Amino acid sequence: MGEMTNRIALVSGASSGIGLATAATLAREGADVAVLARPQDDLSEAVRLVEEHGRRALPVSVDVRDSAAVRAAFDRVEAELGPIDAVLNNAGISRVAPLVETTDEILDELMSINVAGSFYVLREAARVMQPRGAGAIVNTGSELALMGQPGFVAYTATKGAIVSMTRSAAAELVSWGIRVNSVCPGTTRTPLLMVEFEDSADPEAEIAEIASSVAAGRFGEPQEIAEAVVFLLSDRASYAVGTHLVVDGGRSSCIPAGNIGVSHQ
């Protein structure tokens, strides 16, 4: 029996990367999974991976910036799959620009998707879970909610907001039997991240340089983040409330050994 057997899970941003890996992992652990993504995104791979594990999959196209559409999506999932037990609030985007070149349009897009969109999903999850007095929610933050990096001032503002939102929601909802936590991934090999290297003169050199800043010496894989998410959504994390599980290969907490002259003997 899997850790999520016979539960109903919802994953936003499920068409690729961490969301896709989490949808498949939830199904592996026994959950039926509603997979949400923007109308222009293809959810066929998410559906295939969930059904490959013998579980029901429900694809739902929704723009998380539309609060009414988010509410309708939750109502549809509950009507077609059943009461939602677990939510990965994962839809988001990244934009890289120096502070003085960050336009109002870039800032508005980041805020509307990463902050407002995450808030709408969180609010609807609370709405459907409160009457039943149970549930688990994981919001996707970032290591950059906890550390600074040039070119990401606007992005880090949105992820810092998600970390703060998680704390307050956890404090409010725990008395309803609902646990709220966040996962803060580090540099993870997702399509969202890899597209940021496309305009580089030497993408492989830039990737190698960033990997060298990680104590583990490499990028993370979506599956490694998915395993952490499913842990937080499962009963094994029953005493985890308002926490931020950082999964970043040590980048935000450790100095890479090669940078201080330490070698293995």
Image: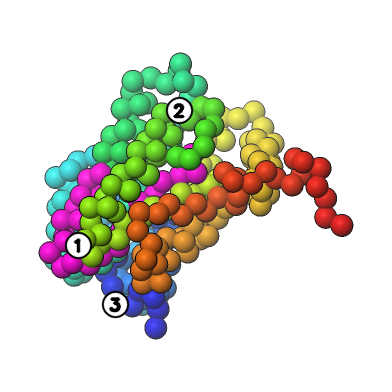
Q: Earlier in the sequence, mark 1 or mark 3?
A: 3
Q: Residue at x 15, y 56 (%)?
A: 127
Q: Is residue 39 above or below residue 209?
A: below
10 Å crowding of disc 2: few (<14), some (14-19), many (20+): some
Q: Is residue 214 above or below residue 56?
A: above
Q: Please name the residue that numbered disc 2 is placed on.
A: 153
- Determine whether the residue tagged by mark 3 lies in a helix, strand or loop: loop
Asked if residue 122 is among those painted magenta in the image, a careful observer would answer yes
Q: Is residue 119 visible?
A: yes
Q: Nearer the viewer, mark 1 or mark 3?
A: 1
Q: Amino acid under label 3?
A: Asn
Determine which of the numbered discs, if any, sits on residue 6 in the image.
3
Q: Please name the residue that numbered disc 1 is placed on.
A: 176
Q: Earlier in the sequence, mark 3 or mark 2?
A: 3
Q: Amino acid under label 1?
A: Trp
Give the extent of the magenta segment: 119-144
CA gap between label 1 and label 3 equals: 21 Å
